[in-house]
Amino acid sequence: MVKTLVTAAMAAPSVADERPWHFIVIHDPAIKHQITAVHRFAYMAAQASVALLVCGDKRLEKQRGFWVQDCAAATENILIEAQQLGLGAVWLAVYPVEGLVQGFRRLLGIPEHVIPFGLVLVGHPAKQQKPVNRYDESRVHTDGWDNLWSNSARQPRRE
Ligand SMILES: Cc1cc2nc3c(=O)[nH]c(=O)nc-3n(C[C@H](O)[C@H](O)[C@H](O)COP(=O)(O)O)c2cc1C
């Protein structure tokens, strides 16, 4: 299952197909426990079956500055695949909080050119969450900022 998750991550789109990522798969209970000290919101890491740290490698970047978007797409793919597999997963931000970046760097021996981006904790869910619908039409604009989608559906677009 872990390999399936990482395969999904690596299927993500990236700028110029540069795939600037690395993934650190953490099974070791001692390291999962240490994560809770590095990242105070990651208190659930000790109970998680596995932790995946998504990292961006500056040396693999062809187009500067896009690694964050590439790693975000890979991270989202892990969440979607986890759902498909009947697992539960949560995304915890690391980058751009410098203390967290350095904390994970020290904990896992990550070199300077590689930036810890985000942590995904994966496990077997205690309960099934119902899907939520957060659709908010006030955030949808059509043919320009001034025309809300909700208005345009009811009245013709102002020319
Ligand atoms: C960049 C990022 C950081 C997040 N950090 C945390 C976190 O520290 N702790 C947590 O429980 N969830 C974290 N989440 C998950 C969000 O809180 C969650 O997606 C949001 O509350 C909506 O809930 P849902 O995804 O379960 O529907 C994070 C999500 C993102 C994208």
Image: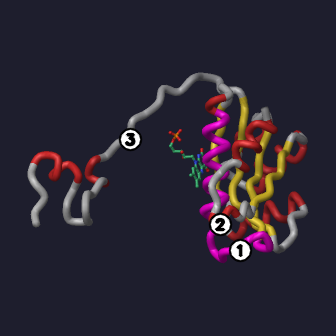
The relative height of residue 4 versus residue 105 in the rendered view (above or below) is: above
Query: Which residue is more in the foreground, 33 or 26?
Result: 26
Query: Which residue is more in the foreground, 18 or 80?
Result: 18
Q: Which residue is mark 1?
A: 62
At x 16%, y 52%, the residue is 152
Amino acid bearing label 3? Arg
Q: Is residue 108 left or right of residue 138?
A: right
Circle 2/circle 1 CB separation < 8 Å: yes
At x 68%, y 62%, the residue is 17
State the extent of the magenta-drawn residues as a range. 58-82
Q: Residue 50: x and y, percent?
A: 79, 38
Q: Which mark is residue 132?
A: none
Please state which of the two labelled residues, at mark 3 or mark 1, is closer to the viewer: 1
Q: Is residue 145 magenta?
A: no
Locate the N terminus by quadrant: top right
Q: Tag 1 or tag 2, which sits nearer the N-term?
A: 2
Amino acid bearing label 2? Ala
Mark 2 vs mark 1, CA separation in Å: 8 Å
Q: Which residue is mark 3?
A: 134
Mark 2 vs mark 3, CA separation in Å: 32 Å
Amino acid bearing label 1? Lys
Q: Is residue 79 magenta?
A: yes
Q: Which residue is mark 2?
A: 16
Circle 3/circle 1 CB separation < 8 Å: no
